[in-house]
Image: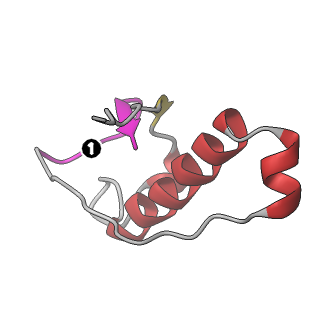
């Protein structure tokens, strides 16, 4: 049996609170967004019974930096 992973995604817009002193997204913010999208994925896909009996943990994070992100940029987050 072959299992194809289901992609979960969210789009976010960069706000002033996401910026560092160089006026682009701070690296720590990317890590927080990974945590946020992972939790949103769990909440969207796991039913009540699963959430009552199990909890999720992150096994691995990966960031592919394709360029800097600036104020008002829209970013696609996927798990």
Q: Could you tell me what secondary structure mostly forms the magenta stretch?
A: loop
Q: Which quadrant, please, contains the N terminus? A: top left
Q: Which residues are magenta?
A: 67-79
What SS does tag 1 mark? loop
Q: Quadrant of residue 76?
A: top left
Q: Position of residue 26 (x, y in %)?
A: 36, 64
> Relative to 33, does residue 54 appear above or below in the rendering?
below
Specify whether residue 73 is painted magenta: yes
| Residue at x-position 87% and y-position 42% | 48
- Percent x, y of residue 47: 79, 38
**Which residue is drawn at the image coordinates 16% and 53% (left, top)?**
64
Query: Where does the C terminus fall, quadrant-wise?
Result: top left
Circle 1 residues within 10 Å: few <14, some 14–19, many ≥20 = some
Mark 1 — residue? 69
Q: Is residue 26 above or below residue 6?
A: below
Image position, residue 77 (x, y; %) = 39, 38
């Amino acid at each position: 049996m072959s299992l194809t992973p289901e992609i979960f995604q969210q789009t976010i817009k960069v706000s002033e609170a996401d910026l560092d002193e160089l006026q682009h997204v701070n690296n720590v913010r990317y890590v927080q967004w990974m945590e946020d999208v992972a939790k949103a994925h769990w909440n969207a896909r796991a039913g009540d019974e699963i959430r009552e009996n199990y909890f999720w943990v992150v096994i691995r994070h990966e960031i592919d930096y394709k360029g800097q992100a600036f104020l008002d940029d829209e970013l696609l987050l996927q798990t």
